[in-house]
């Protein structure tokens, strides 16, 4: 049986003198996945024209591969994501995926995009920037505070969908607050009220079991360079066949209107190695044991959040079903409430205590978000608890 914790730290290129509890922000790429990416890049540079235009993407002419390497990678990823390869395309990240969806729609004056106040800020800004040109609007729904149970959150989102709501953007795992939402229920109820449902799955692939087809969204976009252990920058955009004809990448190029997969696979000369190396991350998860890995990460996040809350004198009150590999807990008011206070505390933890962990200012208080990956263990939580006590 694999022994998780700092015994596995050597599989990652992390500085061993830092207690790293921030896997969820930009991910950490394992050494073996970096090696796989390096091998792909070396192969590409031996014959870049053939690699990029004949093998990675069939742009005409002969290739040794019956199926392009981009499509073969999509087929492989589909096995882990619960999707057909032909319904999956690569994007740099979920921000690019959301931009692709919103820029592809025929917006009209009075149309509305519904977002939540727990959504990722960059996504809300993208929605505003894209829709305002057409006289469409973005409406933000405030979710229950405290957000401790899934039912009231789902009800608040669904009840906010109105006759002008053309698209609702919902999180599978909320970013700063790290709440796992029942996204299949959200999608079903939202679509029943007439809204197209776009799921932001930034933190879901690799962290949670996924079946994209069963979720049934109109579009689902997720990052692979976080919990799925892929190189940066690597995300996916999934769309069912009925949504593919009018879906285009943010950067239009030679494949415009040729095919859904062709447009996204070839957006000009770029490095495809993150996407081609992405299956290696899932293979590593399988070898570690996907169920055991998720169980370790969930238990450490869940128990760690309670331990830190006890150490600082607050309470972590979230339903366990809403905790995946991350947990966000409130900090005492004595530590501040503003973004500047958050920056000071985050820097103090890193530079004075050698601990990397996000601190967020939200709803007039500070919050701390724990990420738990297999290279973390209870000793990392204890170090953070001790540091937080000293900073009170």
Image: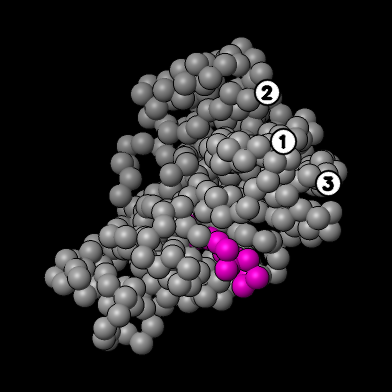
384 is higher (above) or lower (below) than 264: above
Q: How many marks?
A: 3
Q: Residue furthest left?
A: 46
Which label lies toward us, 1 or 2?
A: 1
CB-based contact (under 8 Å), mark 1 and mark 3: no
Residue 123 pos. (x, y %): 57, 41
Give the residue pinned by disc 3. 163
In reply to whether residue 324 is colored magenta, the answer given is: no
Whole-percent x and y of residue 64? 27, 86
Residue at left offset 30%, top offset 49%: 13
At mark 2, the secondary structure is: loop
Tell whether 60 sits left or right of 160: left
Residue toward you, 327 or 379: 327
Please tell me which of labels 2 and 3 falls first in the chain: 3
Task: Confirm or deny contact between disc 2 and disc 3 (CB under 8 A).
Answer: no
Q: Is residue 231 above or below residue 21?
A: below
State the residue position of label 2. 363
Q: What element carries label 3?
A: loop
């Amino acid at each position: 049986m694999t022994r998780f914790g700092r015994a596995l730290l050597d599989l990652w290129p992390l500085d061993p003198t830092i207690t790293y509890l921030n896997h969820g922000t930009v991910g950490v790429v394992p050494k073996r996945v970096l090696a796989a990416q390096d091998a792909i890049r070396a192969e590409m540079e031996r014959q870049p024209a053939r690699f990029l235009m004949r093998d990675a993407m069939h742009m005409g002419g002969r290739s040794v591969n019956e199926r392009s390497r981009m499509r073969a990678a999509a087929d492989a990823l589909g096995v882990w994501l619960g999707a057909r390869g032909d319904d999956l395309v690569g994007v740099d990240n979920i921000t690019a995926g959301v931009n692709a969806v919103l820029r592809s729609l025929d917006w009209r004056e009075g149309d509305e995009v519904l977002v939540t106040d727990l959504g990722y800020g960059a996504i809300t800004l993208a929605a505003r920037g894209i829709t305002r040109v057409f006289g469409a609007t973005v409406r933000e729904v405030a979710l229950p505070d405290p957000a401790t149970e899934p039912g009231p959150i789902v009800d608040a989102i669904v009840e906010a969908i109105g006759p002008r709501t053309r698209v609702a953007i919902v999180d599978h795992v909320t970013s700063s607050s790290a709440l796992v939402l029942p996204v299949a229920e959200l999608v079903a109820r939202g679509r029943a009220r007439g809204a197209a449902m776009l799921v932001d799955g930034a933190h879901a692939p690799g962290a949670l079991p996924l079946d994209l087809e069963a979720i049934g969204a109109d579009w689902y976009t997720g990052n692979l360079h976080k919990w799925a252990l892929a190189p940066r920058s690597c995300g996916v955009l999934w769309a069912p066949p009925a949504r593919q004809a009018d879906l285009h990448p943010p950067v239009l190029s030679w494949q415009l209107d040729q095919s859904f997969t062709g447009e996204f696979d070839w957006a000009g000369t770029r490095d495809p190695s993150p996407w081609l190396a992405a299956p290696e991350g899932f293979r590593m998860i399988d070898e570690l044991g996907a169920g055991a890995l998720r169980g370790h990460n969930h238990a450490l996040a869940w128990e760690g959040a309670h331990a830190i809350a006890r150490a600082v004198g607050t309470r972590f009150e979230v339903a366990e079903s809403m905790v995946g590999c991350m947990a966000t807990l409130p900090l005492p008011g004595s530590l501040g409430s503003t973004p500047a206070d958050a920056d000071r505390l985050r820097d103090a933890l890193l530079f004075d205590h050698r601990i990397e962990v996000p601190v967020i200012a939200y709803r007039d208080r500070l919050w701390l978000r724990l990420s738990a990956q297999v290279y973390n263990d209870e000793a990392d939580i204890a170090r953070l608890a001790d540091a937080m006590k000293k900073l009170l």
